Image (cartoon, rainbow, N blue to C red):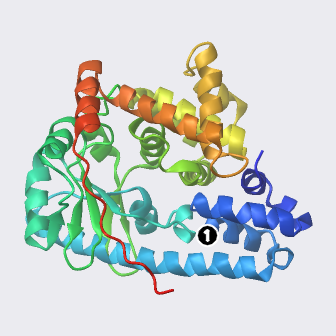
Amino acid sequence: MNLLIRFLREPQVAADWGAEQWNAFLPLARSAGLLGRCLSLLEQHGLLDAAPQRLVDQLQGAVNQTRYVQGQAMRELRAVAGIMAREKVPLLALKGVAYLAAGLPPSGWRNLGDIDLLVPEQDIDRAEHALLAAGWMASAEFDSYDQHYYRDWMHEIPPLVHRDRQTEVDLHHNLAPPVSRIRIDAASLWEQAETVSDAYGLTVQVLSPPDILLHNAVHLFMNDELRGGLRDVVDFRDLFEHFARVTPDFEQRLLARSRLLGCDRPLYYAVSTAHSLLWLTASPEFLAAVDAHAPAGPKKNLMAWLFEQVLAPQRLSLRRSDLSNQLLFVRSHWVRMPPTMLLRHLLHKLFKPRKPPLPTEELPG
């Protein structure tokens, strides 16, 4: 088991680390996007003096940068929320920006690459046009096929980037593609959504606590090829344990919601991975109920092995991790597209002309 996983399970193990362990630990934490979470664990467990000062400085620098990005994200959320309010389009914050808006545990350290938002499917064209009029632009990287791929097959439109601030907005109308094996009733998401407010007067909707976890599970284990990586598994563990502390019957609510939305398999993958890698705290009854939805036979062990090779490698750039990434990439497409659609998509990507690389400038020697 790698050092980062050991630390995330039991931070006290770092009390006896020497330079060799810290030097191996830092690249893993940086690659996983978990520098801020690691600093919070060092602080929480009184281990700052056990860590080299240079390492603590790097962790603190990462947190400072994250605070800046979070501020920019909330500014953009307020801007978009104002636009949608004028257009009378309901708006719901997703993932990282939702954690910030709701003050959930990951907001203490979670960085963001974009702003994920949900609007009703019948309003998504109006929402897009309003954002385009307000300074957001479609990326030039997407050709006509990509536009078709997103608009006809996926649960979101192509990303929009603000022309001045370069902030990206991902506008969704569901949590899973309409052509995938997971079919989620978006109307049910809105029915269970909760309204939150921040200190600056922003009021926005977020998913209900069970739906937040199910979105994490579906996004990581069904929509993507573990691109969110270990960071999203840490999010799942931290959010699950937080909700379970504040809501006595949360496990039963999560199971019922998963059954209603058809998310039992991704929930199994999320819970089993968080439990095996990060020692998720959950009742034996809950774990048994989730395990009932595991894949049969050897596939269960194979998937667990693939997830571990990608999420918890002994060191970076291992060949077996690269192979596991490739296999999970293929699987991520297989579960979200019917076979004929997948074949067409892969053929297009295979024969699509590649753009020449941009010229590079040599640094003065």
Horizontally, is 34 left or right of 327 in the view? Answer: right
Reply above or below: 221 against 35.
above
Task: Tell me what residue is drawn at x 11 percent, y 62 percent.
Answer: 88
The residue at the far front in this view is: 365
Where, by quadrant of the figure, is residue 290 drawn? top right
Looking at the picture, tell me which residue is in the foreground, 73 or 331: 331
Q: Which residue is drawn at 70% across and 38% down?
A: 276
- Image quarter (top left, top right, bottom left or bottom right) of the N terminus: top right
Note whether 146 is above or below 184 in the view shown: below
How far across and down, in percent of the image, does residue 204 sit?
A: 31, 64
Residue 256, can we see it? no
In the image, what residue occupies the spot 24% across and 39% down? Answer: 154
Q: What element carries label 1?
A: helix
Depth check, front residue: 307 or 182: 307
Which residue appears at 48% of the width and 27% of the height? 264
Position of 198 with respect to 23 (left or right) is left
Position in image of residue 216 (x %, y %): 46, 46
> Quadrant of the rendered structure where residue 167 is?
bottom left
Amino acid beneath label 1? Gly
Label 1 Cα neighbours within 10 Å, binned few <14 / some 14-19 / many ≥20:
many
- Residue of label 1: 36
Q: Where is residue 313 in the image (x, y as percent from the top left)?
A: 68, 45
